[in-house]
Amino acid sequence: MLEPGVLTLAATPIGNPLDASVRLMRALEEADLIAAEDTRRLARLVSALEVGTTGRIISYHEHNEAERTDVLLEALAAGRRVLIVTDAGMPVVSDPGFRAVRAATEAGYPTTVIPGPSAVLTALAASGIAPDRFAFEGFPPRREGRRAGALEPLADERRTMVFFESPRRTAATLAAMAEAFGPQREAAVARELTKTYEEVVRGSLAELADWAETTEVLGEIVIVVAGAEPVSASAEDLVEEILARTAAGERLKAVAKELAKDNPGVSASELYDLALRRRG
């Protein structure tokens, strides 16, 4: 049950309306004010869920977020139950909502979340790529130069990376990723998740770039890219760091263990003995 004077963020289905939670349906019925990214999309969702709304509905998107946030705060101040929903998935995650959360928090109003569908987690789970550590990178820049500049610093990122992309730019983005991360980097492209034509295509970035170039890519796109493989330094490469750190007061054995842990193929005893010999 929605509480008065509380800002609620609610996840909406990313494709299949049957993924809507009972809490979302109740929230739509109970809210005094619903801020929707697209009021027409909200109307279709409400119709599909067969729920009724009695609260005021306003549009709340990237172009009016600044001015409409004040409307949300006024409603909270009046003890209204305020609900934010976006076109699909969780508000704030590459969607409107962050400005409202910050403003409500700074003004002292509580914020709560109704969890639910997530394109990020759904694609990650379906990709077959290691999910234990991942980073969500949102939409890459549209322009070629800026896109390359944004991807290049991520080349050594060890975590799995998740991106959103437009179907029109998917081929260009995959080609840019193959250039920045290497053509053999493992990746997956998920499209139309939870919908009738859901598809997950897996392969190297080079293979996926060729696929996208020769295929009519349609629907909502999520790209999952494996993290960079760790590059193990040799014992000789690490000795100077060991000597510098021990000269600064760290214990030789502790430094050797730490560096061995971070560099597979190099043992702590090997580093320890080599450092002792270098010391003379």
Image (spheres, rainbow, N blue to C red):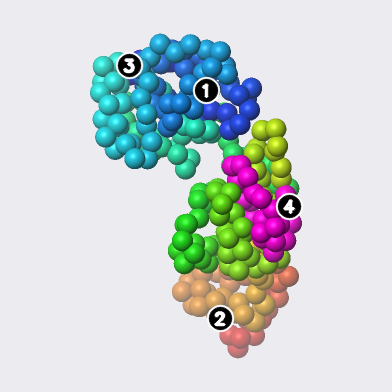
Alpha-carbon distance for marks 3 and 2? 63 Å
Alpha-carbon distance for marks 4 and 2? 42 Å
- Badge 4 marks a residue whose secondary structure is strand
Q: Is residue 203 magenta?
A: yes
Foreground label between 4 and 2: 4
Q: Are marks 3 and 4 in contact (CB under 8 Å)?
A: no
- For disc 3, the marked residue is 80
- Badge 2 marks a residue whose secondary structure is helix
Alpha-carbon distance for marks 2 and 1? 64 Å
Residue 200 in percent (x, y) is at 71, 45
Regarding residue 210, the answer to whether it shows in the image is yes
- For disc 4, the marked residue is 202
- For disc 2, the marked residue is 240
Quadrant for the C terminus, please.
Answer: bottom right
Residue 139 shown left or right of residue 234 in the figure: left
Residue stretch rendered in magenta on the structure:
201-225
Which of marks 4 and 1 precedes in the sequence? 1
